[in-house]
Image (cartoon, grey):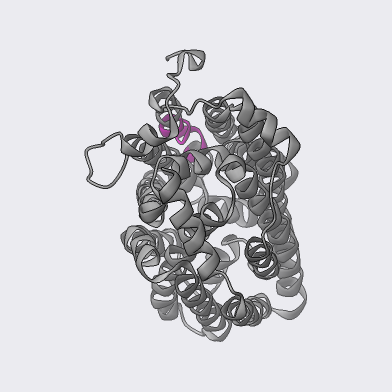
Amino acid sequence: MLDLDQAEAVPPRSLADEPSPLPGISRNVFLLALVSFWNDIAGEMLYPVIPIFLASTLGAPFAAVGAVEGTAEAAASVLKGGSGWIADRFGQRKRLIAAGYLLSTLAKPLLGLATGWPFVLGARVLDRVGKGVRTAPRDALIADSARAGVRGKAFGFHRAADTAGAIIGPLVAIGLIAWLGEGNLRPIFLIAFLPGLAAVALVPLVRDQARHRAVADQMARAPLRWSPPLALFFGVSGLFALVNSSDAFLILRARGLGLSTTLTILAYVFYNTVYAGLSTTAGSWSDRVGRKPALVLGLLLFAAVYAGFALASSSLWVWPLFVVYGAYIALTDGVGKALIADLAPATSRATALGLYYLLVGVGTLVASLVAGGLWDRLGAPAPFWYGAGGALLAALLLTLAPLEEAARRAGRGAERRA
């Protein structure tokens, strides 16, 4: 593996202009997409298995599932905020990216050793710590490696590659379950270590960005300028996070409606296939028509899906609902990051992304704890009605927020400076 200290210093403009095998996608974006592809094969082999492992193998209550997933995501989000600032202040993006992927890879086999849900919590926190360390620096490097006019496409392509791994990972898990049996899930956690190593091995090929000392000094004085549109988007995102619980509840709901373990994982694969297929198109669409229409449409689809899961009385509903859920995530995940990159100053882009992840992660912890409690006390439909109502409110507030003209001005200014 190459020494990260020997990374070539590259000016910001050349990061966006270096070609890759795909037109319109820079070399850095392409390589970071490959890293995420392999990492997501490893992670998504386990994601649909973990709630089933907790509930069936370890006998954990639904509230514990919410605590595990919510706490793990909150830990990741706290670190995302800190790693984003470090990446901007000290120019340590590539080091942080490498460290994050390594920590997540080491956590995989530990999950297979768990004898109770607190052990799973510890291993999941380590995995999410890795995600927290790497995500903001990685996304800031993606933003630096794409021009403003194609930034939505760049984030969309990265999410498509990431989600392609999320399609393959569960399929591998299904094959392993068929081979090992539904009552023998532990070896899957050990096998997931291998694609994680492939992701770690690719990181040294990514090129970092040199930062002049004056830029670092500027960051120390003014790490982030909060424009009204940026603050408004953070406020709406925080509200939505408070009702957007972990996807583990969707998996458990699908299983509760009658799907077997294998079919539940296959439904999750189905959702990721839709997500991967639409992500680049959704990002490019947001480049043309604006970020806000894509985000509002995504929130409305989320509300429809959660209402559908609340009302569903048969496993047949799971399949169309997961299709629509894939469209929701394609319209919101990469597009939301692109909007923050549009609105935040280039010198504090990683800081803004990190704080966004911190906000969303804390909200996800609260939402997951609430969802688990609602499920245990009021039944399966309750957490989904909670999510649907909150998403409708967030969509209304986002519709009223004046974000688009500010984003266009930021994009035109970035292009002139380039």
Residue 67 lies within the magenta run:
no
Part of the protein shown in magenta: 188-196
Q: How many marks?
A: 0
- Which quarter shows the N terminus? top left
From the viewer's side, name the closer residue of 249 and 75.
75
Report the quarter where the C terminus lies: top left
Q: Is 282 rendered above or below residue 349? A: below
Residue 137 location, quadrant: top right
**Residue 229 against residue 182 in the figure, above or below:** below
Rendering coords of residue 326 (x, y %) = 42, 66
Determine if residue 116 is in view. no
The answer to whether any part of residue 145 appears in the image is yes
**Does residue 322 sit above or below 359 in this rendering?**
below
Nearer to us in this view, 237 or 418: 418
- On screen, 238 above or below 414? below
Residue 195 on the magenta span: yes
Looking at the rendering, which quadrant does residue 29 occupy?
Answer: top left
In the image, residue 348 lies at what x, y percent? 62, 42
In this image, 411 relative to 278: left or right? right
In this view of the protein, which residue sits in the foreground, 217 or 290?
217
Classified by dominant secondary structure, the portion drawn in magenta counts as helix
Quadrant of the image occupied by residue 106: top right
Q: Nearer the viewer, residue 301 or 255?
A: 301
Q: Position of residue 96 (x, y in %)?
A: 58, 29
Residue shown at 35% from the left, 57% from the top: 276
The percent coordinates of residue 377 (x first, y second) are 77, 76
Q: Is residue 409 left or right of residue 113?
A: left
Q: Residue at x 23, y 43 (%)?
A: 22
